Image (tube, grey):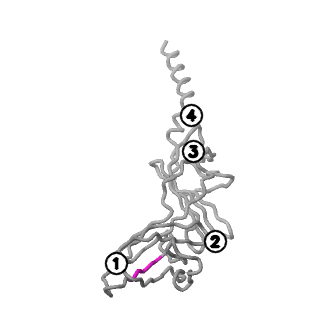
Amino acid sequence: MAIIMKKSLLFILIILLPFLLEGQIALSGKFCKTTNAGFDTQCYKFQNDGTFEYYESSCVGVERFIKGSYEIINSKIRLNLDRGAKKFKIDIKELPEEENDRVNIYFRVSNILGRGIQATIFPDSLNIHDFSFEKHLTDPDGHLKWVENKQNNKKLISIEQSAGPARKFELDFNKSQMVLIKFIPLIKDTANNKEYDFDMMNGSPKKVSIDGNTYIQNK
């Protein structure tokens, strides 16, 4: 009787083993691929809590970035992108007044790493014939200064960078300000809500294949 019970338990264990192992799989770590002779890098960074980050970087900095969550299903990985991720972040700081009837507005545009990038900034209501590169285009380090008459109203401001879609925000014109704008470009969502393969070695994932690309775990 005892022998039969042991065999039954062994049989059940063999059946359940793949499911038990799957529950122990963790994609902790960074998985990357490089292109352009090593100058461009794309990486997925997986956390033990089921979240991940993805970024594409080149010699000029991070060009795409996204966050999300992942889950292991039938020995495959499913990615769920954070569709609520912000495309840019604005921090506005009030400055001391230098003139009673005029305001100074300083802009600084940067990428996710804080490196200055060039962009055009202009009131959304601006007539195209009034556009001026001197007034509406930042310098290569992302700096731009406006000196405007003080007004007791808000204006909708547009900002464009690298031929991408315009981002918009409201700005008071009744006080001097420092406007810090940080772009957070997002990866396309073609990888969202799909299942992908990963290769195991010594009980832990070593490679992940996503959208036809293979990412190797960094040591």
Please tell me which of labels 1 and 3 falls first in the chain.
3
Frontmost of labels 2 and 4 is 2
Amino acid type of the residue that numbered disc 1 sits on in the rendered structure: Lys
Q: CA distance from mark 1 to mark 4?
A: 64 Å
The secondary element bearing badge 4 is classed as helix
Tell me the residue that label 4 is attached to: 18
Residue 165 horizontal/vertical position (percent): 58, 66
Q: Are marks 1 and 3 in contact (CB under 8 Å)?
A: no
Magenta stretch in the rendered image: 104-108
Q: CA distance from mark 4 to mark 3?
A: 18 Å
**Is the stretch drawn in magenta largely helix, strand or loop?**
strand
Residue 52 horizontal/vertical position (percent): 50, 53
Residue 183 horizontal/vertical position (percent): 50, 68
Tell me the residue that label 2 is attached to: 39
Please tell me which of labels 2 and 4 falls first in the chain.
4
> Of the numbered discs in the image, which one, if any, rests on residue 175?
1
Please tell me which of labels 4 and 3 falls first in the chain.
4
Q: Are marks 4 and 3 in contact (CB under 8 Å)?
A: no
Amino acid type of the residue that numbered disc 3 sits on in the rendered structure: Arg
Frontmost of labels 1 and 3 is 1
The secondary element bearing badge 2 is classed as loop
Q: Are marks 2 and 3 in contact (CB under 8 Å)?
A: no
Residue 182 horizontal/vertical position (percent): 47, 70
Does residue 113 lie above or below 213 as drawn?
Answer: below
Amino acid type of the residue that numbered disc 2 sits on in the rendered structure: Phe
Q: CA distance from mark 2 to mark 3?
A: 29 Å
* Residue at figure coordinates x 32%, y 87% from the top left: 99
